[in-house]
Amino acid sequence: MFVWAGISCSRLLTSASYKTLFTRKAHFISFLDQGVSLPLCKGTRRTFIPVQLYQKTMSMYQGGGSNSPDDGTVRVIDMRSDTITKPTPAMRRAMAEAEVGDDVYGEDPTVNALQEKAAKLFGMEAALFVPTGTMGNFCSIMAHCWERGSEMLLGDCAHIFIYEQGGSAQLGGIHPRTVRNKPDGTFDLDEVESKVRTSDPHLPITRLICVENTQNICGGRVLPLSFLKELRELANRHKLPVHMDGARLMNAAVSLNVPPSDILQYCDSVSVCLSKGLGAPVGSVIGGKKDFIARCVRLRKVLGGGMRQSGILAAAGLLAITEGAARLHEDHENARTIAEGIHSLDPSVLQIDLDTVQSNIIVFQLVSHAVTPGQFCKMLNTYDPNDSLDIDVRVSMLATDFKRDIRCVTHHHISADDAQLVLKKFRAVVGRVAGMKG
Ligand SMILES: Cc1ncc(COP(=O)(O)O)c(C=O)c1O
């Protein structure tokens, strides 16, 4: 049976392939056989791609989740990321009732309230609401690297380096130079220092150091304050600013049990996501000095991020940094419960280093070669009568087949009871995998 996922394919089918499909009947049919049906209403290029095909193109997101039924007989527990969180009822109410104005004129009272509150929380002079974490990082980097020929130093596992399309180079002309991230998300400070450029017309000019906290690819690792302090001293010696990609800064603060300003005392700027574990539907906040934020305002505008009556979004953001932040410890507790449960399972199938679980991200290793990480995730996300569970539990996680790592993330849709259900499903699937030949 096909499950149809509606996807606008105007890009996929704009070029020659689109013409080929329409002009050559045989090709058309064979394309259909592969599961692509075509249009369609006059003038539109909307088509439908079966989920199977869709998942091939989006292999990183294997495991799916949000498309599965969740009608009471099935419990779908989507742990692919904290980015899938939906706004709480209180956020939806606040959004409906938000006072708004034109934020490009600086006249949206709700955006202004969010920015003031965030600046205080960060212990910084000013803050700016932006649509996404990617834009928050990009504006910050550009605002620090104002001159041409600038270079930034950052970890080779940094989200900015790996997952933001190289935007700072692509759009900003900034040269990224990496230092090796250690498994705990930090880097060797001697290596950083050795990579600060000397003044030489052959070389770019080092203008910025970036860190990420919590470090996503390293498994949500929390940067120790002692590391940040030493990095600050190094940066001061070379008169360099430090930017923190603090997409999950509030998780780091909860994990260290300190206010965010204690972490940010070592940084010149930060970009914090409201739309991940904090639960807002959209938005990030940049923090920094007033003149830095003034440059970010210009950059946000040229990038098309001047959002007018964005108080509707900021209203959810205000609840994100208050109520959303106040409950993050629950996500960390649930992550620990799940990690400890995985640790107690058959080590010939799964292994996990419990010390690596410091926030809401859990990364564990599939040791058994009886199945691939992708197949293991599929088993977690599929009903099997042999599992003998009271209800049909389907759990979605992310796997990368080139590593044997599987990642899952806790967030506000996952309760302590869900954590127990996840472990029941794990026990069942691990039992089945243990019985297969590796
Ligand atoms: C560490 C980190 N930084 C930045 C971002 C980018 O955020 P956005 O998706 O809002 O652009 C993400 C997104 O997952 C992230 O994990």
Image (cartoon, rainbow, N blue to C red):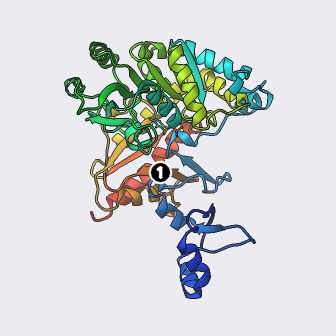
Residue 303: name its quadrant: top right
Front-lying residue, 130 or 93: 130
Quick check: 396 left or right of 175? right
Front-lying residue, 125 or 168: 168
* Residue 259 can be seen in this image: no
Quick check: 287 left or right of 376? right
Quadrant of image for the C terminus: bottom left
The image shows residue 146 at horizontal and vertical percentages of 43, 26
Amino acid on which the number 1 mark rests in the picture? Lys
Which residue position holds label 1?
A: 425
The image shows residue 393 at horizontal and vertical percentages of 55, 52
Residue 240: name its quadrant: top left
Quick check: 387 left or right of 117? left
Which residue shows up at 38% across the image and 26% down it?
A: 222
Quadrant of image for the N terminus: bottom right
Q: What element carries label 1?
A: helix
The image shows residue 178 at horizontal and vertical percentages of 29, 36
* Residue 236 can be seen in this image: yes
The image shows residue 69 at horizontal and vertical percentages of 64, 56
Disc 1 under 8 Å from ligand 1? The reply is no
Which residue shows up at 57% across the image and 68% down it?
A: 13
Which residue shows up at 64% across the image and 74% down it?
A: 38
Relative to 217, does residue 322 appear above or below in the rendering? above
Relative to 56, does residue 249 appear above or below in the rendering? above
The residue positioned farthest toward the bottom in the image shown: 26
